[in-house]
Amino acid sequence: MQIKILYFAQLADLAGKTEETRELSNTSPAALYDELQTAYHFPHTFKQLQVAINHELSAHEAELKDGDSIAFLPPMTGG
């Protein structure tokens, strides 16, 4: 199944891109994030992030389907 991954803020900087498409065999956002965290050295744990699937905030336990887009949203800081 193919998933489009959107990167924002610090995650985009670390990945060196704002989006990519990946072929997945697992439907778990947590498993996908583990792969990305290893590949790009993301500093946040999965539980620190918000997950958006198809541009809507989703539960961490949601399952991905072929053609979905997913974004992992890091904690925001600022003032």
Image (spheres, rainbow, N blue to C red):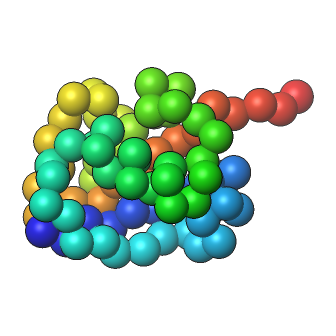
Q: Is residue 9 left or right of residue 48?
A: right
Q: Position of residue 58 (x, y in %)?
A: 29, 34
Q: Is residue 24 left or right of residue 32?
A: left
- Residue 55 in view in this figure: no
Q: Position of residue 25 (x, y in %)?
A: 13, 61
Above/below status of 10 relative to 1: above
- In the image, 58 versus 12, the foreground residue is 12
Q: Position of residue 75 (x, y in %)?
A: 63, 31
- Residue 23 in view in this figure: yes
Task: Please give the name of the residue rendered at 30% of the width and 72% of the height, measured from the top-left corner.
Answer: 22
Q: Position of residue 70 (x, y in %)?
A: 34, 54
Q: Is residue 58 left or right of residue 40?
A: left
Count of marks, rendered view: 0
- In the image, 3 versus 55, the foreground residue is 3
Instruction: Please identify the residue farthest to the front as the structure is shown.
Output: 38
Task: Please give the name of the residue rendered at 51% of the width and 61% of the height, measured from the top-left corner.
Answer: 39
Where's the N terminus, which quadrant? bottom left
Task: Please give the name of the residue rendered at 69% of the width and 33% of the height, measured from the top-left corner.
Answer: 76
Q: Is residue 67 left or right of residue 75?
A: left
Task: Please give the name of the residue rendered at 64% of the width and 40% of the height, measured from the top-left corner.
Answer: 43
Above/below status of 40 relative to 45: below
Where's the C terminus, which quadrant? top right
